Image (cartoon, coloured by chain):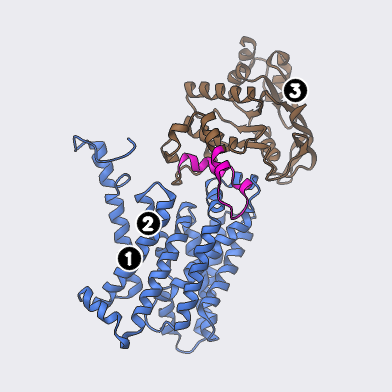
């Protein structure tokens, strides 16, 4: 049974159709990469999965339940620049903000909440930096804080938007190891990425997206160059295809 | 004038307006200091300015009709804030443009209304630049009540306001009612402004909202500390400002703001970690041992 199911999803944005009839599943224990050119609708898809955009048609199912805004089954890790890093707040308090919706109005965090935060910090190996102001963190540490904030909800599905962008190579490697570990620990992980070689190497499956899912499967199942040419709108001499052959 | 003489004047029954002015000034500085932390951290100083100007027509109407100034100002400020929030939903216009349209319009409306009142020049000046005389007892209670209400709501909705400032999208995804919480924050800013207008004046009130919080931000990286420091800085500056203005017969609003500005500049230069001096010393390694600094 898949943890995340997307069935016939169509989304309009500002009167324009951005996604048409998207079908996608992500199983528990699986790391799936969502790749496609700029403007293909990757971020729109993630935002719709989070309930931030209302689809014109179709539905999103998490753990057999249709997703609404405020559903706790999904953990979302936005692009790093969406977050106000100059805010005077410590790492652990940022992670706690992940539980704001769960806590509900007027309630303060209790023991169970702090335990969830502690676990999330442990998972991303940020326990030692828990009291550090977030403004002092490096790019990789910031990414891990956002990941911990998502994990603080103990979601079964994790969505990440461009987690590798702007990170140096060693940090990217650490992060992709971490994402694979999280997938093995029974999370369903879906991430968008621009790093194709990295995605081919790291992800269990890839979904090629351009307005709709052109194809989805393991890197081996996606050997057909036509699929990539269609998705990215490139010719047969594009370096992209050479990378694909080499992998 | 020595501080002792100031103290004597405070308890002089002939000068009963003085302790009242001091109380209102300190109280409004404390409320503005706390609310100002959210204003500064969210980068909405311009909204604070807009609301401050927008309360003016309400004050003018209340003045012309001899109604309650605080009530009039609040209604006008809230109406403008809601208009800004609603018009900002249109993606074609950025919020700052919408604010620019409405707050000047509100201010203009205020000027037109108050010009219809007899003897308007004097009252206009009083609104714009503040005055420490003529605060009715009733305003003291209304301002106190409004202040307690504002602080209570800020306390109750603290985690929601923080979550929205940190990451709006995420807050929305978590199911927070971002639009309504924004309006609540605007209303709180309006109330803080309205109770301060009497002593500080309509134009200078922005300083009470922004300067103490900005000063506190320079001094700490902890939100909790910032939200205690800002009202402390604001309240103390109001006290010192009123003392100086009483001693030398300076206008009160202007003096309080200048004291606040001095505190801000001092923090900018001397703050332990983020101050200009500390940075210079760290960079230039003037001292062989680094100054006491937790995380290097």
Q: Which mark is residue B229?
A: 2
Queried whether the magenta region covers residue B61, the answer comes back as no
Subunit under mark 2: B
Q: CA distance from mark 3 to mark 2?
A: 57 Å
Q: Are marks 3 and 1 in contact (CB under 8 Å)?
A: no
Residue marked by disc 1: B237
Give the quadrant of residue A191: top right
Q: Which chain is blue?
A: B
Residue located beneath label 3 in the image? A215
Using the rendered image, report if marks 3 and 2 lie on a common chain.
no
Give the colour chain A carries in the figure.
brown
Q: Is residue B106 left or right of residue A6?
A: left
Q: Quadrant of the N terminus of chain B?
A: bottom left
Kindly state the secondary structure of the residue where label 3 is placed: strand
Which region shows up in magenta?
Answer: A90-115
**How crowded is the residue under tag 3: few (<14 C-alpha within 10 Å), some, or many (20+)?**
some
């Amino acid at each position: 049974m898949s943890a995340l199911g997307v069935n016939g999803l169509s989304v309009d944005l500002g009167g324009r159709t951005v996604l048409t009839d998207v079908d996608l599943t992500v199983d528990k224990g699986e790391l799936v990469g969502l790749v496609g050119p700029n403007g293909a609708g990757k971020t729109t898809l993630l935002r719709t999965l989070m309930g931030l955009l209302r689809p014109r048609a179709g539905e999103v199912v998490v753990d057999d339940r249709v997703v609404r805004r405020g559903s706790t089954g999904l953990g979302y890790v936005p692009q790093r620049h969406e977050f106000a890093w100059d805010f005077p707040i410590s790492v652990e308090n940022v992670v706690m903000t992940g539980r704001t919706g769960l806590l509900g109005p007027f309630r303060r965090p209790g023991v169970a909440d702090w335990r969830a935060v502690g676990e999330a910090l442990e998972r991303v190996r940020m326990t030692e930096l828990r009291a550090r102001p977030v403004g002092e963190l490096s790019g990789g540490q910031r990414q891990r804080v956002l990941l911990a904030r998502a994990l603080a909800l103990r979601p079964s599905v994790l969505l990440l938007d461009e987690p590798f962008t702007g990170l140096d190579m060693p940090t990217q490697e650490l992060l992709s190891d971490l994402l694979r570990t999280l997938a093995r620990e029974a999370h369903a992980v879906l991430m968008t990425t621009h790093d194709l070689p990295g995605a081919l190497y790291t992800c269990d499956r890839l979904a090629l997206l351009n307005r709709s899912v052109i194809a989805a499967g393991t890197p081996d199942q996606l050997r057909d160059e036509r699929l990539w040419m269609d998705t990215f709108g490139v010719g047969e001499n594009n370096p992209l295809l050479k990378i694909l052959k080499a992998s | 004038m020595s501080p002792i003489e100031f103290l004597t004047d405070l308890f002089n029954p002939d000068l009963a307006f003085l302790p009242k002015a001091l109380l209102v000034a300190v109280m409004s500085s404390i409320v503005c200091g706390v609310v100002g932390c959210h204003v500064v951290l969210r980068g909405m100083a311009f909204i604070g300015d807009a609301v401050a100007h927008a309360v003016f027509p309400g004050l003018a109407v209340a003045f012309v009709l001899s109604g309650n100034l605080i009530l009039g100002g609040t209604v006008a400020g809230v109406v403008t804030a809601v208009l800004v929030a609603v018009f900002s939903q249109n993606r074609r216009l950025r919020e700052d443009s919408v604010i620019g349209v409405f707050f000047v319009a509100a201010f203009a409306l205020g000027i037109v209304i108050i010009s219809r009142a007899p003897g308007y020049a004097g009252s206009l000046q009083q609104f714009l630049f503040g005055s420490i005389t003529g605060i009715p007892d009733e305003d003291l209670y209304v301002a106190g009540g409004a202040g307690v209400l504002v602080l209570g709501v800020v306390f109750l909705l603290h985690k929601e306001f923080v979550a929205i400032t940190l990451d709006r999208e995420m807050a929305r995804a978590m199911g927070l009612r971002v639009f309504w919480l924004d309006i609540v924050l605007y209303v709180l800013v309006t109330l803080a402004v309205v109770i301060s207008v009497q002593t500080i004046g309509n134009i200078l009130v922005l300083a009470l909202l922004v300067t103490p919080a900005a000063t506190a931000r320079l001094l700490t990286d902890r939100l909790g500390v910032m939200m205690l420091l800002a009202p402390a800085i604001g309240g103390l500056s109001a006290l010192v400002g009123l003392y100086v203005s009483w001693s030398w017969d300076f206008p009160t609003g202007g003096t309080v703001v200048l004291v606040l500005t001095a505190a801000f500049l001092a923090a900018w230069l001397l703050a332990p970690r983020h101050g200009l001096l500390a940075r210079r010393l760290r960079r230039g390694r003037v001292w062989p041992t680094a100054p006491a600094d937790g995380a290097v």
